[in-house]
Image (spheres, helix red, strand yellow):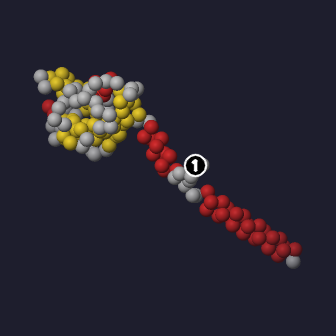
Amino acid sequence: MKKRRNMKTLSFLLCMTLIVTMALSTVGCGGKNENGGAASAESAATSANNNVLGEGQTEFAFTVVDKDGNETVFEIHTDKETVGEALLELGLIAGEDSEYGLYVKTVNGITADYNTDGVYWAFYVNGEYATSGVDTTPVTEGDSYSFKVEK
């Protein structure tokens, strides 16, 4: 009789523990941070802040698209006159001077050399293929610039 009573008490305690655990896990899985925003929005903002580079009054977006289509987005701050000057100063681009201007071979540490592998870095302004080189394109507040690997 005493054994049966102990089993009932133990079963009751285990059941209550299970109910409390389930209630706490349900409340804890809301995915909200202290400010009421979604946790994923906070992590996205944190990762975006990691790609803020430079110092200066003018701000523009810079995107790098590698040969696999992976995009890396930067927020650039500069006081330089041209996009090329700003990106060279930050070490985001490198290349060789040619009769047509700067021939960009490396962007964000990724090299694309037409003479070696048949691909090159194409320069875009606001999503359109640029009509001028990166070293002669003036920085315009709010514009977006990008380099994409193309064949």
What amino acid is labelled 1 in the image?
Asn
In this rendering, the answer to whether 8 lies above or below 150 is below
Residue 36 appearing in the image: yes
Judged from this view, the residue extending furthest toward the right is 2
The residue shown at (28%, 24%) is 81
Instruction: Report the label total.
Output: 1
The residue shown at (45%, 37%) is 49
Label 1 crowd (10 A; few <14 / some 14-19 / many >=20)? few
Local SS, label 1: loop
Snapshot quadrant of residue 52:
top left
Q: Nearer the viewer, residue 66 or 3?
A: 66
Judged from this view, the residue extending furthest toward the left is 99
* Residue holding disc 1: 35
Residue 117 appearing in the image: no
Snapshot quadrant of residue 2:
bottom right
Q: Nearer the viewer, residue 39 or 66?
A: 39
x and y, in percent, of residue 24 in the image: 66, 60
The quarter in which the C terminus is drawn is top left
Q: Nearer the viewer, residue 86 or 19?
A: 86
Snapshot quadrant of residue 21:
bottom right
Q: Nearer the viewer, residue 17 or 49?
A: 49
The quarter in which the N terminus is drawn is bottom right
The residue shown at (29%, 38%) is 144
x and y, in percent, of residue 76 in the image: 36, 32
In this rendering, the answer to whether 86 lies above or below 12 is above
x and y, in percent, of residue 123 in the image: 22, 36
x and y, in percent, of residue 78 in the image: 35, 27
Q: Is residue 148 left or right of residue 17?
A: left
